[in-house]
Image (cartoon, rainbow, N blue to C red):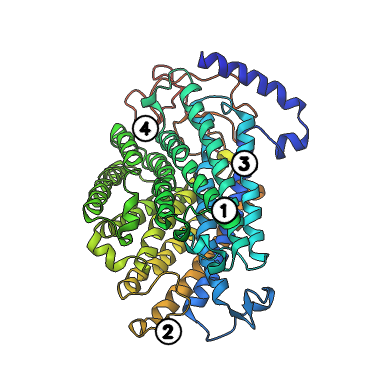
Amino acid sequence: MATIIAEATGQAILHEEHEQSFLRKYIFSTDHKVIALQFLFYTLFFLMIGGLLAMLMRYQIAWPARGQLPLGGIFPESMVASGYILPEFYNSLVTMHGSVMVFLAIMPMLVGVWANYLIPLQLGTHDMAFPRLNMLSFWAMVPAGILTLCSFFVVGGAAGAGWTLYAPLSARPDLSGVALGQIMWLAALVFVGLSSILGSVNYITTVINLRAPGMTWMRMPLTIWSLFITAILALLAMPVLSAAGIMLIFDQTIGTSFFLPEGGGQPLLWQHLFWFFGHPEVYILILPAMGFTSEILSVGSRKPVFGYKAMVLALVSIAFLGFIVWGHHMFQSGMNPMLGLTFTVSTLFIAVPSAIKTFNWMGTMWRGNLQLHSAMLFAIGFVAMFAIGGLSGVFMASTPVDIYIHDTYFIVAHIHYVLFGGSLFALFGAIYFWYPKMFGRVMNETLGKIHFWLTFVFFNLVFFPMHGVGMVGMMRRIYDSTGYAHLQGIEDTNALITWSAFVLFASGFLFAFNFFWSLKKGKKAGANPWNATTLEWQTPSPPKHGNWEEIPVVYHGPHEYSHPDVEDKDWLAQNERPDVVSPAPDSH
């Protein structure tokens, strides 16, 4: 039945291609590949915005009140007065940097871009199950970005209560003084939730119903497994955050008291609702990266993924455990010690499947024929940085240790090792890897390797020293550390971090140049420049509208490298039968 539906859908898509106007084909498109590209350019823009906000933060932290901001004249007086960043604007920078990076850059890039682009291609179908719903999932994200940017310029400025927006500060306009900006932030959050829910329904339905003949569950690429499980997490978690955001809007606007103690509300209720979403969100931000890394390491090592079934089981385990560990963010909230112990144990348990994946990645590379192209370097970098982030997370799982390091820069270091060293490293690897399929050209390898080494070196120079300044007690979201006796002597470290952050941010422009230059000048790519086995590489680069003339038939798993039945090449595509293998195609 699924095959019949896919074939009928494909015929309709191929027929529709010749009838579409430019606006319908490229702007309000229902083609999953065009929607993926819309998400890609949208998220790259907000990745730059989030980076700019971080640079302003680092400038203030390194040189508080010691010198005027060189470009201070471009900001309104409500943000930068006489060249100096105001404390209120700094609070907005901290809040909006985290919000933009998590909700408008990393999450939609991991899921909106790659789930849209890869799920139909790797499953061997023509499009998503619900193409119009898919289009709506992108356009629901657009108001979120507009509201976020505009919130900087309303009276009172953007939200400034931290990206977690803890009540009662965020629920009391008279305390926070930035009610309108916070309401816009919350409204943007609701749109992000709507986009994620619509997309998740589509991804789950497509994976369940539209797999090609022979594409059993245990023949799906690990990328699809990771995106499928991520969609389930988002579908269960995002409604909780959206409901909490609406409740907080009501507290600020119509006088309810969901989170205000003077009206009978509970400020801790916001923390529970936020982190019940927030910890699955951590895995929404890392599971797709794990899938990309598995794919890239297998192709780059010319070996099957080590322990495929264990990797799938680890993904499922992480998803399940991710819903029962949210309380470790609240050890400081007066939690019952026995309840805290429960969250400690569950948090330690979640390290087990993560460790399984890390050792299996190492097993995949062990004695492989490593091809150290840019995508492979970023995938290896992901494994190393994720391991550091995971090890630092073990400290926070222990309640006595967390009491000391909670809300210090140790936490900032940890989350960035997971979400920058983890998610963004994998995202860069994915862009270098699938760029030829998306655009029909290969990004410049020399520039790509320079980008990797700049990113790798200066990322560690930025975030590893933060463990140290956190251990001496430097607080998160601090405007000026020079007024605290216990923070005297770390000025040089903060300056080193800031200079390194500037170089790290500048390396992004090298990536951007490579990305856009390669669109026109990059070396043309054949259908399968990596000699990979999954189905997307068996289509032209870029794939035509509708992907397939006929739905392919799948004969084996996704990582058939060094196959014993193949003599003239070291790989076997999923839709090739071992006894009828065609010669290796020209890769370029």
Q: Name the residue under label 2.
A: 482
Choose the circle earlier in sequence order: 1 or 4: 1
Mark 1 against mark 4, which lies toward the viewer?
1
Element marked by disc 3: helix
Q: Mark 4 points at which residue?
A: 561
Separation (CA) of disc 3 from disc 2: 44 Å
Mark 2 Cα shell of 10 Å, populated few (<14), some (14-19), many (≥20): some
Cβ–Cβ below 8 Å for labels 2 and 1? no
Q: Position of residue 75 (x, y in %)?
A: 67, 73
Mark 3 Cα shell of 10 Å, populated few (<14), some (14-19), many (≥20): many
- The quarter in which the C terminus is drawn is top right
Q: Mark 1 points at which residue?
A: 249
Mark 4 Cα shell of 10 Å, populated few (<14), some (14-19), many (≥20): many
Element marked by disc 2: helix
Mark 2 against mark 1, which lies toward the viewer?
1
> Quarter of the image holding residue 317?
top left
Separation (CA) of disc 4 from disc 3: 36 Å
Choose the circle earlier in sequence order: 2 or 1: 1
Q: Which amino acid does label 4 sit on?
A: Tyr
- Name the one closer to the observer, 467 or 82: 82
**With 166 as the anchor, is 515 left or right in this view?**
right
Q: Mark 3 points at which residue?
A: 138
**With 242 as the anchor, is 75 left or right in this view?**
right
Cβ–Cβ below 8 Å for labels 2 and 4? no
